[in-house]
């Protein structure tokens, strides 16, 4: 369990979104896979969206990761978040 003060602090700094009747709290991130030489391979972008969703007193924790094999001008974390928010209501149904 997490203390109420820790929960309140997290809610104050983590972005919130609505998706259907779910309230989503989550953080995105983007970067690149490292090549064998240890340097970032900008042809292999990655993006993630992690957080939790709440509805009707229920909480679901999630972590999504996207590893692409082609360069992207857009931050993949943001693209992944937008796709996740769009698909969440149908994916969760009335669970």
Image: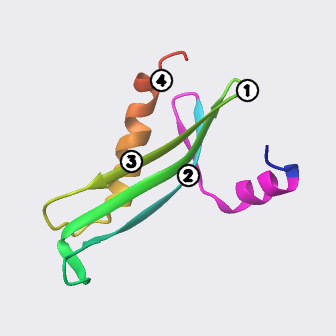
**Residue 54 in picture, x, y percent from top left:** 64, 34
Separation of marks 1 and 2 at Cα, in angstroms: 18 Å
Q: Secondary structure at mark 3?
A: helix
Q: Earlier in the sequence, mark 3 or mark 2?
A: 2
- Location of residue 5 (image quadrant): bottom right
Q: Secondary structure at mark 4?
A: helix
Number of disc labels: 4
Q: Earlier in the sequence, mark 1 or mark 2?
A: 2
The residue carrying pointer 2 sits among few (fewer than 14), some (14 to 19) or many (20 or more) residues within 10 Å by Cα, namely: some
Q: Earlier in the sequence, mark 2 or mark 4?
A: 2
Q: Which mark is residue 26?
A: 2
Separation of marks 3 and 2 at Cα, in angstroms: 12 Å
Tell me, yes or no, whether the two marked residues, 1 and 4, touch with CB atoms within 8 Å.
no
Placement of the N terminus among the 4 image quadrants: top right
Tell me, yes or no, whether the two marked residues, 2 and 4, touch with CB atoms within 8 Å.
no
Q: How is the image coloured?
A: rainbow
Q: Which residue is mark 4?
A: 92
Q: In this image, 12 relative to 4: left or right?
A: left
Q: Which residue is mark 1?
A: 57
Q: Is residue 8 placed above or below 39 in the rendered structure?
A: above
Span shown in magenta: 5-21
Separation of marks 2 and 4 at Cα, in angstroms: 17 Å
Separation of marks 1 and 3 at Cα, in angstroms: 24 Å
């Amino acid at each position: 369990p997490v203390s109420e003060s820790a929960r309140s602090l997290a809610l104050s700094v983590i972005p919130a979104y609505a998706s259907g009747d779910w309230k989503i709290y989550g953080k995105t991130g983007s970067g690149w896979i490292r090549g064998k030489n240890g340097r970032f391979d900008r042809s292999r972008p990655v993006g993630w969206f992690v957080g939790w969703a709440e509805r009707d007193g229920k909480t679901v924790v999630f972590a999504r990761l996207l590893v692409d094999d082609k360069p992207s001008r857009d931050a993949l974390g943001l693209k992944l978040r937008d796709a996740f928010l769009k698909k969440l209501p149908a994916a969760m149904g009335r669970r």
